[in-house]
Amino acid sequence: MKLPFDLREIKRGDFSYLTRRKLKNASDEETGEIVLWKWKEKEASEYVLRCPFCQTEQQGEVTLVKRPYRVRCTSCNRSIILPKLLSQAKKEAKKRG
């Protein structure tokens, strides 16, 4: 996935939100990925996505209102949930232990 900016050139305070997450499909396999960011001066967040269901790569803008955040794939029209990091970490810890 190609980002519209270089992560190494980001200055502290450029973003109010930035995350990179692996996304799971219906079979619970990590087949997708999203990078989502929100510039400090903008209302909407921008993203680059590889859909975990149809593998289509896309980018766009979305206004995130409440958690868990969701992004809709423009190709297969499925709603993709960005898991909360804490919830995801707890699930993985249970599997390991």
Image (spheres, grey):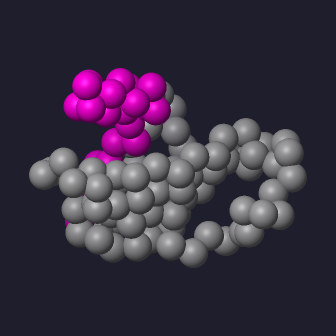
The picture places residue 97, in percent across and down from the top left corner, at 25, 25
Magenta stretch, residue numbers: 76-97
- Indicate yes or no whether the magenta region holds residue 87: yes
Name the foreground residue: 53 vs 8. 8
Horizontal side of 13 relative to 26 (left or right) equals right
Q: Residue at x 67, y 71 (%)?
A: 4
Does any portion of residue 45 appear in the rendered image?
no
Q: Residue at x 40, y 73 (%)?
A: 57
Number of disc labels:
0
Does any portion of residue 96 appear in the rendered image?
yes
- Indicate yes or no whether the magenta region holds residue 96: yes
Horizontal side of 37 relative to 60 (left or right) equals right
| Position above or below: 49 against 80 | below
| Position above or below: 26 against 92 | below
The picture places residue 78, in percent across and down from the top left corner, at 24, 55
The picture places residue 8, in percent across and down from the top left corner, at 78, 63
| Position above or below: 94 against 23 | above
Q: Residue at x 85, y 42 (%)?
A: 13
The picture places residue 76, in percent across and down from the top left corner, at 23, 65
Name the foreground residue: 34 vs 42. 34
Q: Name the image quarter holding residue 47.
A: bottom right
Q: Residue at x 46, y 32 (%)?
A: 85
Question: In the orientation shown, which residue stands out farthest toward the left?
Answer: 27
Q: Name the image quarter holding residue 54.
A: bottom left
| Position above or below: 39 against 88 | below
Horizontal side of 4 relative to 68 (left or right) equals right
Q: Name the image quarter holding residue 49.
A: bottom left
